[in-house]
Image (cartoon, coloured by chain):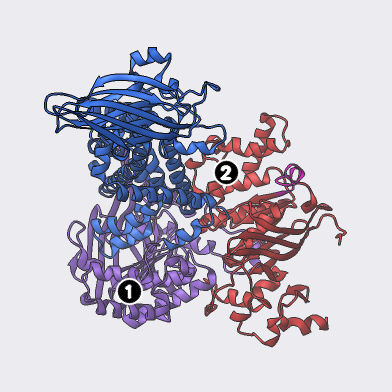
Chain colours: A red, B purple, C blue
């Protein structure tokens, strides 16, 4: 299936399974999403749901023990999954698709100055002709994230966590990619620093067409950037929805339970825990994977539900079968 | 009420020496720089602050893990002096740490993990210890008990590990629990369980709890009083309700403004937060430590005079010249929040 | 622990290593049981008295399995089992005639020929004439001599006989005239005719035809069966390696733990000692001590441990420092654990599993160290070790004269022990060190 607007970023049925001694880990099990120009989607999930593997799968940063890696990733009209590795590295990774990993502040090379590290991204992808023009581009990029210019000659250990995170963001932005995947960009940071960085991201969102995929477990923080939201559970998307609808009225029982377990500062909210634990990604259960923790479980749940389209949203739950057919 | 006071801390300072080349003293990190604190029996108080504000150091000083440079700690009427044998004190204070997996020895089974504090404090014979272990596991709902006793920590989930840590903190039947970020490393859906468990245990056993966190939103479900810490000092103390309704200190206001709730409208507006970094504890800013970032900074006052403890409304204390009632600040420039 | 053992099964190298170690242990057990220590020492240091009847520098006898390899074996004939005639000649004089026949089925020549006498008399020694009869009937006169008690007649070294037969006696007396480079196979006889001059005196003789091959391992320049050294070298090597590895690992652990736990000047002092020790050249010191003081294997073992203790401290200290900051140590202090308890029950159990692989790979290095010292001539001279065999071989120029077996045998054992332990150690390392683990 070829999507017609070539500006849409589409992921189709992405699968990533790892081989381990105990069996194959089905980390990403058939994930699909669509992202229009300038839009941001947040992927929300708890630990062990496979969201970090999703980020890796999109960027093709795979470890040695991959068993299955399939699906399509359409970017600018091209299925980049089908490209050979070297072509992907040169043309797609970082130039069209960039990535800010978890704990990114520790991803900086401690023995190279900041300015040089960011320039390296440019030079490696031949987007600058010489170090001088690279330096100028770096200064511009660093200004965009709100870091003073005199920090460029310093080393990572001299900077605080917040500063480093901004610089890693600058590194991802410097090649003006079409899509940036951010994996927990603010979880290790203080509240004030987090707010500052979210402000930076919001500004960039408004001023460029860059698409963001924000992967996080922090539902509250995710609402800062989301145009669309996807909830990931046991390797699959169980709900995909516009932000307005999602935060106000989550449909999937897991989304609802998740929302109910997040403490809110304002308002009077009663919290409820979710009993049990998420299933292991090795040999996940047949049928709906949330069934044994779901308060609304019924007989049909022993069969795996598809993603039903409901009012412009997608919900992977039998409870919405009728609503979907009615539309 | 004097006999209602369990813990009393006066003018506590905990400094760490910084040495170069092993013996040249370069300076001190003022992690805790003059803290006064009272805790009553059965009360739950939160100490809120960002990383680097000194809250963990305060917790560890209270636990006797760090030696204060200055100041007193009085527990149940008796002074806690770092250099003496503190076993009487350690048995009455339980410690819950942030990282559930790191907090327990990975090579010991659950039974042994829980037995260690008992053995060290001379609780015996074996039958009594086993009885206490079983009760502790039941209290934290790690049941069936026999299922969990022989397990190693890596066979437990994150939530279960933290329950184990709580059980261990409870096993000596303490009067005070110090919980340092007990839920920040747990998943969102598990946090609720643990917070509810702690609350339940507190009510059942009449425990006093010091709950240390950077996440104000969890404090609501647990604590009656809050202390906000910044740069080694407690800059505001209030009941939770007062703090949410009328935060006084500009830092507290910034903190509250920065915390998002899951609200789709967030994506459409920028947050009004001060820029800058948390202060260095090695060379803290002069006088008021927040003044370099404060939107209400008053030059000539905030950078010259150390703010005193003011009480703008009953039960709410704040270290900020905006609430000056001594006349140092001209009335026209004092703002009422 | 059991989990580790189960995981080991996945690594073929570990299984091979374990098999080799098992083999070495089996050899050690056999050596200790079959030849008690006292006996082994006695045999090894016995000298001519013990090894008289074994050939010198003999190759391993089983090599004849290979085509083209011809090794003669030792044949011993004693006069006590063979016919003799005694004739009284009056006044106490007797004439005796003895015949010592034997079959010689080998293509290659014997190495040596000797006759050992067993006689007793008061004043007058018996006189004998020796003749040699070959399978083709030819006879050669060997010598005329008088016999003293515990005396021996070395036919091969008889210069006069050499000149008489025109060549080395052990070759000339056996050579096949049709194929002079081979020996004549068949029945030989040593004829002894002699006179006993006293009624109470007696005479017995033993002919030893020394072969070129002997036993499973051959013999060395002092006629000693090398199997003794090879067999006994195994438990000694294993014990030395094990004791040295245990001694140094335990000491290093304890010292590192103390230094890290107490910090301050204690840690500083230990670090300074460690740094000095790093510069100390251990091999020259070992050489000095064994040359000037004592070559006893226990002294060397002790010194090796002492020199090795401070070497590993930096690494262990790094481990301990990491562990010391672990949250569970803090928690233990918070519920009142004392320093000793923390070190013994909370820190050591964390460190020990990580040390096991390096401990295992440490063992062969000590084995090699002992062998090195021996080859340099500093080994304990009375104890049969592989290194000692190598040293003897070296001093006798074994490789130059083609006695390869003398060098190859101990070398193979050394290599095998090194291989076994390192394969096991590397596999253990892959299990214990998670970063090296395969998926």
Q: Which quarter of the rendered picture does the N terminus of chain A lie within? A: bottom right
- Residue drawn at the location 51% of the way across and 57% of the way down: C9
Q: Nearest the camera: C332 or C285?
A: C285
Q: Which residue is mark 2?
A: A147
**On residue B193, which mark appears?**
none
Instruction: Specify whether C25 is left or right of A183.
Output: left
Q: Is residue C400 visible?
A: no
Q: Nearest the camera: C362 or C179?
A: C179
Instruction: Specify whether A238 is left or right of C135.
Output: right
Occupied quadrant, residue C400: top left
Tell me the CA gap for discs 1 and 2. 47 Å
User: Do the residues under discs 1 and 2 have CB atoms within 8 angstroms?
Assistant: no
State yes or no: residue A96 in magenta: yes
Q: Give percent across and percent down for residue A39.
A: 73, 59
Q: Is residue C235 above or below residue B130?
A: above
Residue range in magenta is A85-97
State yes or no: residue A106 in magenta: no
**Disc 2: host chain:** A
- Residue drawn at the location 38% of the way across and 48% of the way down: C27
| Dot 1 alpha-carbon crowd within 10 angstroms: few under 14, some 14 to 19, many 20 or more | many
**On residue B170, which mark appears?**
1
């Amino acid at each position: 299936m070829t999507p017609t607007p070539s500006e849409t970023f589409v992921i189709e049925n992405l699968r990533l399974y790892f081989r381990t001694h105990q069996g194959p880990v089905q980390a990403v099990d058939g994930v699909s999403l669509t992202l229009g120009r300038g839009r941001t989607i947040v992927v929300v999930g708890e630990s062990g749901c496979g969201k970090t593997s999703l980020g890796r799968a999109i960027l093709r940063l795979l470890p040695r023990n991959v068993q299955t890696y399939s699906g399509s990733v359409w970017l600018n009209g091209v299925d980049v999954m089908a490209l050979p590795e070297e072509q992907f590295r040169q043309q797609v990774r970082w130039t069209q698709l960039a990535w800010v990993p978890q704990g990114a502040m520790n991803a900086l090379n401690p023995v190279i100055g900041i300015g040089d590290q960011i320039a390296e991204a440019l030079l490696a992808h031949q987007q600058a002709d010489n170090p001088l023009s690279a330096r100028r581009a770096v200064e511009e990029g660093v200004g965009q994230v709100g870091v003073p210019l005199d920090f460029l000659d310093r080393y990572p250990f001299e900077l605080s966590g917040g500063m480093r995170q901004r610089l890693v963001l600058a590194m991802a932005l410097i090649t003006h990619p079409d899509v940036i995947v951010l994996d927990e960009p603010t979880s290790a940071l203080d509240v004030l620093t987090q707010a500052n960085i979210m402000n930076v991201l919001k500004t960039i969102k408004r001023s460029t067409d860059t698409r963001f995929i924000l992967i996080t477990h922090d539902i509250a923080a995710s609402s800062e950037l989301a145009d669309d939201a996807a909830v990931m559970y046991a390797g699959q998307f169980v709900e995909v929805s516009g932000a307005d609808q999602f935060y106000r009225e989550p449909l999937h029982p897991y989304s609802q339970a998740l929302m109910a377990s997040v403490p809110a500062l304002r308002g009077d909210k009663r919290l409820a825990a979710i009993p049990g634990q998420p299933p292991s990604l090795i040999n996940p259960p047949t049928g709906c994977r949330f069934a044994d923790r779901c308060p609304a479980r019924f007989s049909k749940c022993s069969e795996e539900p598809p993603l039903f389209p409901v009012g412009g949203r997608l919900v992977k739950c039998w409870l919405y079968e009728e609503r979907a057919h009615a539309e | 009420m004097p006999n209602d006071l369990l813990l009393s801390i006066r003018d506590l300072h905990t400094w760490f020496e910084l040495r170069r080349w092993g013996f040249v003293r370069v300076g001190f990190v003022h992690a805790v720089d003059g803290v006064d604190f009272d805790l009553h029996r059965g009360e739950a108080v939160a100490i809120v602050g960002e990383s680097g504000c000194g809250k963990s150091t305060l917790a560890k000083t209270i636990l006797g893990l760090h030696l204060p440079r200055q100041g007193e700690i009085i527990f149940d009427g008796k002074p806690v002096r770092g250099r003496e044998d503190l076993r009487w004190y350690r048995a009455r204070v339980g410690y819950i740490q942030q990282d559930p997996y790191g907090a327990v020895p990975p090579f010991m089974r659950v039974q042994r993990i829980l037995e260690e504090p008992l053995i060290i404090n001379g609780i015996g014979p074996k039958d009594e210890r086993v009885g206490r272990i079983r009760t502790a596991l039941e209290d934290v709902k790690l049941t069936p008990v026999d299922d969990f006793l022989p397990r190693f920590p890596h066979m437990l989930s994150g939530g279960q590990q933290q329950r184990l840590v709580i059980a261990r903190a409870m096993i000596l039947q303490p009067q005070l629990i110090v919980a340092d970020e007990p839920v920040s490393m747990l998943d969102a859906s598990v946090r609720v369980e643990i917070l509810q468990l702690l609350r339940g245990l507190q009510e059942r056993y009449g425990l006093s709890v010091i709950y240390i966190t950077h996440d104000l939103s969890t404090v609501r479900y647990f604590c009656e009083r809050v202390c906000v810490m910044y740069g080694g000092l407690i800059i505001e103390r209030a009941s939770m309700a007062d703090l949410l309704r009328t935060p006084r200190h500009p830092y507290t206001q910034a903190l509250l403004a920065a915390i998002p709730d899951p609200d789709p409208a967030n994506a459409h507006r920028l947050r009004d937060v001060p820029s800058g970094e948390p202060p260095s504890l090695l060379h803290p800013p002069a006088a008021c430590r927040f003044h370099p970032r404060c939107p209400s900074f008053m030059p000539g006052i905030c950078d010259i005079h150390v703010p005193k403890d003011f009480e703008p409304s009953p039960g709410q204390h704040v270290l900020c010249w905006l609430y000056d009632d001594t006349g140092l600040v001209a009335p026209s420039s004092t703002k009422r929040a | 622990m059991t989990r580790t053992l189960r995981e080991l099964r996945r690594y073929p190298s570990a299984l091979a290593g374990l098999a080799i170690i098992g083999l070495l242990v089996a050899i050690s057990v056999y050596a200790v049981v079959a030849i008690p220590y006292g006996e082994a020492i006695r045999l090894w240091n016995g000298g001519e008295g013990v090894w008289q009847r074994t050939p010198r520098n003999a190759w391993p006898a089983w090599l004849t399995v290979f085509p083209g390899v011809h090794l003669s074996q030792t044949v011993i004939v004693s006069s006590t089992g063979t016919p003799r005639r005694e004739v009284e000649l009056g006044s106490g004089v007797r004439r005796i005639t003895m015949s010592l026949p034997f079959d010689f089925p080998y293509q290659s020549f014997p190495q040596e020929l000797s006759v050992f006498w067993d006689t007793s008399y008061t004043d007058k020694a018996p006189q004998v004439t020796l003749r040699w009869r070959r399978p083709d009937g030819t006879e050669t006169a060997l010598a005329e001599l008088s016999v003293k008690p515990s005396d021996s007649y070395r036919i091969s070294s008889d210069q006069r006989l050499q000149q008489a037969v025109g060549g080395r006696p052990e070759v000339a007396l056996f050579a096949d005239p049709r194929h002079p480079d081979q020996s004549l196979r068949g029945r030989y006889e040593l004829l002894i005719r002699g006179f006993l001059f006293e009624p109470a005196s007696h005479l017995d003789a033993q002919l030893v035809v020394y072969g070129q091959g002997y036993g499973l391992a051959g013999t060395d320049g002092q006629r000693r069966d090398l199997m003794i050294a090879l067999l006994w070298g195994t438990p000694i090597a294993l014990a030395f390696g094990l004791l040295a590895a245990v001694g140094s690992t335990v000491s290093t652990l304890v010292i590192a733990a103390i230094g890290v736990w107490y910090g301050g000047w204690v840690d500083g002092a230990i670090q300074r000692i460690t740094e000095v020790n790093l510069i100390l050249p251990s091999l020259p010191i070992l050489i000095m001590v064994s040359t000037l003081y004592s070559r006893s294997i226990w002294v060397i073992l002790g010194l090796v441990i002492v020199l090795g203790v401070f070497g590993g401290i930096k690494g262990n200290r790094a481990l301990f420092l990491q562990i010391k900051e672990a949250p569970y140590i803090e928690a233990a202090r918070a519920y009142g654990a004392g320093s000793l308890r923390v070190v013994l029950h909370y820190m050591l159990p964390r460190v020990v599993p990580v040390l096991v692989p390096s401990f295992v790979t440490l063992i062969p290095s000590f084995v090699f160290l002992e062998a090195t010292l021996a080859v340099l001539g500093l080994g304990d001279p009375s104890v049969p070790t592989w290194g000692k065999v190598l040293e003897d071989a070296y001093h006798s120029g074994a490789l130059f004269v083609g006695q390869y077996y003398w060098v190859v045998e101990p070398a193979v054992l050394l290599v095998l022990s090194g291989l076994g332990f390192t394969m096991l150690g590397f596999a253990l390392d892959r299990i214990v060190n998670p970063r090296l683990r395969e998926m």
